[in-house]
Image (cartoon, grey):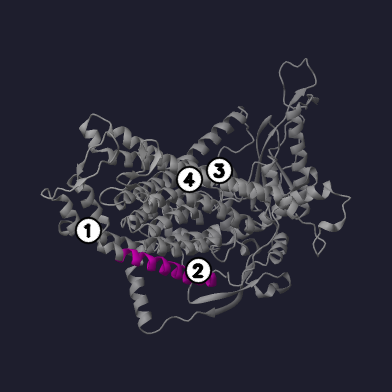
C-alpha cells in the first residue's frame, strides 16, 4: 500500500482526535456554520415565494431584504457562532412589500410552509438543533441541517437499547493443533487478496451492553462527540424524525411528509468525498479504493467496514452475496467438466451416430398438414449432436451435485451468519416493532372520523387499531390483482406458443428451401427473444404493482410490510421468469397426439412438438438466453443506465427551478449536503436480493439442461459485487443504518428453491 493510504488509515475507526476530525469535517461540509456541531441529518425541500414592491414608482425592483444566508435554530435560541438575521448596516433600507393574491398553487405552498415550520418546531422541542438557509430567493432548494446533542443521543440510545462497547474486554480462544497451522497457511496464501483496511483485533473483544445513562461508568467514553459513530447518530435522528408528528393534515413522521411533498428528501451525509487525491482519509474513500472499483475485483470484501458504514442489514447482504459468489466457483468448475465430457464423448454417442448415419433411412411423418412432405431423420443430425453436449451421463451426476450444493450453501450461510451475529453484537437483538408512519396516519384519520364511536374497535389494551373491515378492500384488491397478473403471465406464454405454431406453419409454406430447412431454429430464436422482452417488461410492472398492493394493505410494522412486499414480488417474478421454461421442460411435446389423430390449437394448426433429439436442447437455448439477457439487460444495463438518466433529469429540473442570479452569500464550492442531494435515493435491498434469488433459481432448478449456468452466474456476480459496491458508495445517498440479525424471509425463499430444485432435476 502506498504512503498516502497508510497516512490515512489511522483516522478510520474513531482513531483521530477531536481537532483533526473537526478540521476534516468542516472542510467537507460536515458541520454547522459554527464549525463545532456535526450535521447528522439533512432535510430538503423546494420553496417558491411571490413578493412584489409596494411602491410602483421604483425604477428597478430593489431587494426586499438583505440578510445573512444562514439561520441557526437551537431550542429557540441562536447559538454563539451563528449568523444573526441583520440588515446591511442601514445602507439598503428594505422597501415595503406586499404579497400578491395567492392562487391555489401558492395556497398549497403556504400550507406546506406552515407544516414545515410546525414539524421543525417539534424537532427542536425534541432536543434536536437545526440550521437552515434563509428563503431569500423567489424559488429554489432549501437544506435543513440537523444536529443531535449528547443529551438527545444518550436518551435515544437508551430508548432504542443500542448496544455499545464497555470497558470490559475478554480474549477469544483460537484454534489449536492442525487447524491452527492450516489457518496460518491460508492467511499467508490469501494475503494478496485481503483489502488494505484497518483490521480489528480478533483476539480481544469488548463486551457490549445496551446503553444506559445510569451506568455511564461501564462504557469507554473518551469523547462524547465520537462515542457514537456517524452511522449510529444518523440512525437515532432518523428514529426521531419518524415519530415526530404534525397536527396539520394529521401527518405522522418524515415519510408521510415526503409522500405529501412537504419535504423532497431526507438523508444522512456521506463521510466526505471519495475520489479527491489528498492525505485526508475517510471511510467512504477507503471503501471506494478497496472495494467499490472493478480493479479490485479479486480481493475479498471488507465486510466489517461495510457494516460499520452502511449498517448491519446491508453488511449481511454483501456477506451473503460474497459467500454465494464463492460457492459458484466449484459448481462452475464441475459444470465446465460436464460440458467438456460431452464434447469429448460426442463421437461415441450411439443415438446421435445412428441419427447421423446416412445409410439408415428413417422416414418421418410430415411436420405439418397439406404442405409438408415426409423427411429423413438424418436431417436432424446437428441437433442431436448438439444435444449430447448438455444431455449426457455426466449431467445426471451434475444434477445430484447441484442439489447437494444448494444444501451445503444454505448450511454454510447459517454458520457465517451466526459468526457475524456474534462479532457484530447482534445476538439477542430485539426486533423493533414500531408502527409505520403510514399506519399511524391512517389510524389517526380513522379516529378523527369516528370520534363519537364506542370502544368496540379497541383491543384489550384499549389501543385503537385497524380492523378487518378496514383492511378488506386492500385484501380484495390484492387477491384480484395477483390472480390477474398470474393469468396475464400465462396468457403471455400462451401467446408465444401461438406465435411459434403459426410462424412454423407460415415458414413451412415458403418456396425458399433455406427458409424451410431453418424453420425450427428461426422460430426458437425469435420466440425466446420475445419471451425475454415480455419478461423484462412485466418484471418492472410487477415490482411497482407489488409495492402498491402492499401499501393498500396497511401493514402495521416495517418488518411486516417488507415481508409481504417480498412475497408478492417474488411470487409474481417467479411465475414470470420461469413459466416459459417450465412449459418447454414439462409440457411441450406432451400433447401432440399421433399420426392420424393430432391435437390442434386452432383449425389447421397442430400443437408443436420437440425436436427429434428431444426438448432439452431447446430448453438449454431458452434458459441461456433468458438468464443471460436478464443479467446483461436488467441487472447491469438498467442498474447503470437508469440511475444516470434519473440523475441527469434531476439536474435539468434543478437548473430550471433554481434562480438564475448568483447568490454571493453562498459558498462557491458545493457543500456535502448539496453533493449528496444530487445522488439517487436509496430504495431498499429488495431489488438486489430479488435478482440474485431469481438467478439462484436458474442455477439450481434447471441446471440439468445447461451445465454452464453456474459459470455465467459466477462471471456476472464478480461484476455485480463491484457494481453494487460502486452504486452504494458513489451513486446513492447514504442509507439509514438498520440493525438486523439475519437476512429475514429471503432465507426461507432460498430454502424453498433448494427443495424444489431436487424435484425438478429428478
Res 584 label: none
Query: Any magenta on residue 402?
Result: yes
Evaluate if marks 2 and 1 touch, with contact meaning CB atoms under 8 Å apart.
Answer: no
30 vs 488, nearest the viewer:
488
Q: Earlier in the sequence, mark 4 or mark 1?
A: 1
**Disc 1 versus disc 3: distance between alpha carbons?**
55 Å
**Disc 3 secondary structure class:** helix
| In front: label 1 or label 3 | 1
Q: Earlier in the sequence, mark 3 or mark 2?
A: 2
* Dot 3 and dot 2 residues touching (CB under 8 Å): no
Q: Which residue is mark 4?
A: 490
From the image, tell me which residue sits under label 1.
342
Judged from the image, the secondary structure of the residue bearing numbered disc 2 is helix
Q: Earlier in the sequence, mark 2 or mark 1?
A: 1
Q: Please give the residue where the numbered disc 3 appears in the rendered image.
A: 675
Label 1: element kind? helix
Instruction: Please tell me whether mark 3 or mark 2 is closer to you in this view.
Output: 2
Q: Residue at x 51, y 35 (%)?
A: 648
Amino acid at each position: 500500500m502506498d504512503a498516502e493510504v497508510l497516512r490515512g488509515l489511522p483516522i478510520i475507526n474513531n482513531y483521530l482526535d477531536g481537532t483533526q476530525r473537526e478540521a476534516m469535517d468542516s472542510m467537507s461540509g460536515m458541520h454547522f456554520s459554527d464549525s463545532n456541531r456535526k450535521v447528522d441529518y439533512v432535510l430538503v425541500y423546494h420553496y417558491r415565494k411571490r413578493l412584489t414592491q409596494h411602491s410602483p414608482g421604483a425604477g428597478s425592483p430593489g431587494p426586499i431584504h438583505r440578510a445573512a444566508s444562514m439561520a441557526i435554530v437551537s431550542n429557540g435560541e441562536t447559538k454563539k457562532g451563528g449568523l444573526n438575521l441583520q440588515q446591511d448596516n442601514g445602507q439598503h433600507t428594505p422597501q415595503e412589500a406586499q404579497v400578491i393574491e395567492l392562487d391555489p398553487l401558492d395556497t398549497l405552498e403556504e400550507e406546506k410552509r406552515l407544516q414545515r415550520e410546525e414539524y421543525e418546531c417539534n424537532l427542536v422541542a425534541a432536543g434536536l438543533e437545526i440550521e437552515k438557509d434563509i428563503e431569500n430567493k423567489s424559488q429554489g432548494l432549501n437544506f435543513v441541517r440537523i444536529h443531535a446533542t449528547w443529551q438527545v443521543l444518550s436518551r435515544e440510545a437508551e430508548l432504542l437499547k443500542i448496544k455499545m462497547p464497555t470497558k470490559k474486554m475478554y480474549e477469544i480462544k483460537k484454534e489449536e493443533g492442525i487447524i491452527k497451522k492450516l489457518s496460518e497457511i491460508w492467511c499467508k496464501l490469501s494475503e494478496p487478496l485481503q483489502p488494505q483496511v484497518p483490521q480489528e483485533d480478533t483476539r480481544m473483544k469488548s463486551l457490549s451492553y445496551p446503553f444506559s445513562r445510569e451506568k455511564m461508568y461501564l462504557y469507554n467514553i473518551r469523547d462524547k462527540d465520537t462515542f457514537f459513530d456517524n452511522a449510529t447518530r444518523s440512525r437515532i435522528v432518523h428514529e426521531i424524525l419518524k415519530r415526530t408528528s404534525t397536527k396539520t393534515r394529521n401527518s405522522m413522521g418524515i415519510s408521510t411528509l415526503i409522500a405529501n411533498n412537504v419535504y423532497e428528501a431526507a438523508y444522512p451525509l456521506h463521510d466526505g468525498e471519495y475520489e479527491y487525491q489528498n492525505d485526508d482519509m475517510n471511510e467512504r474513500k477507503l471503501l471506494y479504493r478497496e472495494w467499490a472499483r472493478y480493479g479490485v475485483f479479486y480481493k475479498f470484501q471488507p465486510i466489517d467496514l461495510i457494516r460499520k458504514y452502511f449498517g448491519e442489514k446491508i453488511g449481511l447482504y454483501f456477506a451473503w452475496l460474497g459467500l454465494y459468489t464463492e460457492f459458484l466457483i466449484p459448481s462452475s468448475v464441475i459444470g465446465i467438466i460436464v460440458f467438456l465430457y460431452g464434447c469429448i464423448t460426442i463421437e461415441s454417442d450411439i443415438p446421435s451416430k445412428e441419427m447421423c448415419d446416412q445409410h439408415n433411412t428413417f422416414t418421418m411423418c410430415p411436420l405439418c398438414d397439406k404442405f409438408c412432405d415426409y423427411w429423413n431423420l438424418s436431417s436432424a443430425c446437428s441437433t442431436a449432436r448438439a444435444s449430447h453436449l448438455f444431455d449426457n451421463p455426466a449431467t445426471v451426476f451434475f444434477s445430484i451435485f447441484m442439489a447437494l450444493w444448494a444444501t451445503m450453501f444454505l448450511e454454510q450461510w447459517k454458520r457465517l451468519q451466526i459468526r457475524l451475529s456474534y462479532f457484530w453484537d447482534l445476538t439477542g437483538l430485539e426486533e423493533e416493532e414500531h408502527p409505520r408512519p403510514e399506519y399511524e396516519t391512517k389510524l389517526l384519520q380513522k379516529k378523527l372520523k369516528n370520534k363519537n364511536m364506542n370502544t368496540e374497535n379497541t383491543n384489550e389494551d384499549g389501543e385503537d387499531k385497524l380492523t378487518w373491515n378496514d383492511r378488506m378492500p386492500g385484501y380484495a384488491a390484492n387477491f384480484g390483482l395477483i390472480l390477474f397478473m398470474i393469468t396475464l403471465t400465462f396468457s403471455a406464454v400462451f401467446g408465444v406458443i401461438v406465435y411459434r405454431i403459426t410462424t412454423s406453419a407460415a415458414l413451412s409454406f415458403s418456396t425458399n428451401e433455406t427458409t424451410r430447412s431453418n424453420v425450427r431454429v428461426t422460430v426458437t430464436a425469435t420466440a425466446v427473444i420475445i419471451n425475454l422482452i415480455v419478461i423484462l417488461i412485466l418484471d418492472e410492472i410487477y415490482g411497482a404493482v407489488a409495492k402498491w398492493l402492499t401499501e393498500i394493505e396497511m401493514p402495521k410494522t416495517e418488518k411486516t410490510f417488507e415481508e409481504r412486499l417480498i412475497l408478492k414480488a417474488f411470487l409474481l417474478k417467479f411465475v414470470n421468469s420461469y413459466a416459459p421454461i417450465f412449459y418447454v421442460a414439462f409440457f411441450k411435446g406432451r400433447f401432440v397426439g399421433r399420426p392420424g389423430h393430432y391435437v390442434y390449437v386452432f383449425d389447421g394448426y397442430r400443437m408443436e412438438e420437440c425436436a427429434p433429439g428431444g426438448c432439452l436442447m431447446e430448453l438449454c437455448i431458452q434458459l441461456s438466453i433468458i438468464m443471460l439477457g436478464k443479467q446483461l439487460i436488467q441487472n447491469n444495463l438498467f442498474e447503470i443506465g437508469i440511475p444516470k438518466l434519473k440523475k441527469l433529469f434531476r439536474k435539468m429540473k434543478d437548473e430550471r427551478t433554481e434562480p438564475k442570479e448568483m447568490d454571493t452569500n453562498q459558498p462557491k464550492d458545493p457543500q456535502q449536503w448539496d453533493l449528496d442531494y444530487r445522488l439517487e435515493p436509496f430504495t431498499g435491498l429488495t431489488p438486489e436480493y430479488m435478482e440474485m434469488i431469481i438467478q439462484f433459481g436458474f442455477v439450481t432448478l434447471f441446471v440439468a439442461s445447461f451445465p454452464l449456468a453456474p459459470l455465467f452466474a459466477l462471471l456476472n456476480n464478480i461484476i455485480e459485487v463491484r457494481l453494487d459496491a460502486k452504486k452504494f458508495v458513489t451513486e446513492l445517498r447514504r442509507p439509514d443504518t438498520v440493525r438486523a440479525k439475519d437476512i429475514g424471509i429471503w432465507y426461507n425463499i432460498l430454502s424453498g428453491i433448494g427443495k424444489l430444485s431436487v424435484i425438478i432435476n429428478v
